[in-house]
């Protein structure tokens, strides 16, 4: 028995998300009195792989074929399933991001495994294996019992603290059995956005809604974001009106994000919007309406006109930085 983690890498580097997964998985392994293994797919330097050991990984299976550089759901599902067999894993942990949401259901079917998705904390019990998760767009919580021998878990970003352990992982080259016919995704060109923080990776997000009244009023949002090293976002009505790009739309029908800090300016907080940002560690809301639903979800709230509040907010950040 073991716990296996799929650690996604970005151009050969791991992000905080990967270390969260290993910390989470190593704690589950401790609860099950077993070990934590990792499957790394793609070209990653040994020094980078060893960082996973600092968070509890004891065994790292490394697969470095060039044709595994880009995510192919069918191929990666096959590789992770084979890695689980090699590691004798009964629990597989992935991130609850786009990659994890694509791979976890496929693994569940392939391995006849129970699936616990979007978890925010450790299992409350291992016998029976019971997971805790948000339901109804974060309006309620449920304890779900996973009864199959094999279990697939996906962890929401920023929902588990990093746990440093004095540990050195063993790295093994792993050669999965994958035929060329299975590799159907061909990447011909890669275009990367530069000069702007990617919304789904941002630690801080400053978001605007219809309360900004006009696309011409977005200057303070962008200035505050630049000062904080944050990404900018918006609510769906704003993107539908064409005030901002749909790339910035957060919510149930847009991008699901989980930054450390989410600043909602002029956003009422409809349930569809909150479903996409409720996993944020801290939410700060600025709105003129004291009864706006966003205040129920916010850790801190400011009732006032955004165009009057933001200049003071910006000046306070400038003073703090100086």
Image (cartoon, rainbow, N blue to C red):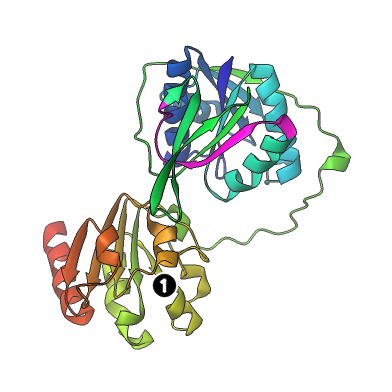
Q: Residue at x 61, y 21 (%)?
A: 90
* Image vertical order of residue 253 relative to residue 50, above or below: below
Task: Answer with left or right where residue 137 lies relative to residue 266.
Answer: right
Q: Residue at x 70, y 29 (%)?
A: 81
Q: Which residue lies most toward the top here?
A: 33
Across and down, in percent, residue 153 comes to 54, 35
Q: Residues within 10 Å of mark 1 (few under 14, many from 20)?
A: many
Is residue 120 highlighted in magenta? yes
| Viewer-closest of 22 and 210 | 210
Considering depth in this image, is 29 or 69 the residue closer to the camera? 29
Percent x, y for residue 228? Answer: 27, 60
Number of numbered tags placed on the structure image: 1
- Is 233 placed left or right of 182 in the picture? left
Position of residue 97 relative to residue 211, above or below, is above
In the image, is 310 to the left or to the right of 106? left
Quarter assignment of residue 183: top right
Residue 198 visible in the current orientation: no
Residue 150 percent across, percent down from the top left: 63, 25
Against 57, is 314 above or below? below
Taking the magenta stretch, the answer to whether it contains residue 214 is no
Q: Which residue is mark 1?
A: 235
Please tell me whether residue 306 is drawn above or below residue 271 in the rendered image.
Answer: below
Give the residue at x 23% y 72%: 291
For numbered disc 1, what is the local secondary structure?
A: loop
Q: Position of residue 225 (x, y in %)?
A: 31, 66
User: Which image quarter is the N terminus in?
Assistant: top right
User: In the rendered image, is residue 63 in sight?
Assistant: yes
Report the magenta residues as a range.
110-124
| Quadrant of image for the C terminus | bottom left
* Res. 59 image quadrant: top right
């Amino acid at each position: 028995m073991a716990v296996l983690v799929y650690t996604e890498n970005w151009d050969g580097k791991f992000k905080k998300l990967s270390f969260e997964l290993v910390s989470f998985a190593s704690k589950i392994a401790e609860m099950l009195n077993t070990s934590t293994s990792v499957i790394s797919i793609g070209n990653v330097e040994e020094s980078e792989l060893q960082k996973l050991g600092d968070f509890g990984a004891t065994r790292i299976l490394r697969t470095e074929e060039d044709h595994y550089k880009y995510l192919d759901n069918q191929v990666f599902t096959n590789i992770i399933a084979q890695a689980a067999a090699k590691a004798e894993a009964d629990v597989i942990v992935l991130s609850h991001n786009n990659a994890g949401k694509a791979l976890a259901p496929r693994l569940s079917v392939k391995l006849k495994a129970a699936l616990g998705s979007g978890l925010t904390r450790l299992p409350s019990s291992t016998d029976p294996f019971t997971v805790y998760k948000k339901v109804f767009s974060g309006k309620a919580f449920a304890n779900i019992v996973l009864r199959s021998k094999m279990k697939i878990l996906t962890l929401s970003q920023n929902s588990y603290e990093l746990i440093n352990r004095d540990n050195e992982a063993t790295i093994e080259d792993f050669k999965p059995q994958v035929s060329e016919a299975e590799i159907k995704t061909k990447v011909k060109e890669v275009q990367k956005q530069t000069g702007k923080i990617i919304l789904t990776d941002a630690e801080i997000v400053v978001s605007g809604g219809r309360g900004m009244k006009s696309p011409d009023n977005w200057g303070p949002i962008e200035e505050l974001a630049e000062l904080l090293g944050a990404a900018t976002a918006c609510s769906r009505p704003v993107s539908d009106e064409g005030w901002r790009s749909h790339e910035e739309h957060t919510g149930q029908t847009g991008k699901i994000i989980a930054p450390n800090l989410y600043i909602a300016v002029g956003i009422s907080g409809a349930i569809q919007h909150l479903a996409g940002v409720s996993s944020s560690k801290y939410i700060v809301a600025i709105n003129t309406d004291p009864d706006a639903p966003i205040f129920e979800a916010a850790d801190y709230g400011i009732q006032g006109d955004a165009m009057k509040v933001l200049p003071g907010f910006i000046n306070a950040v400038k003073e703090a930085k100086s």
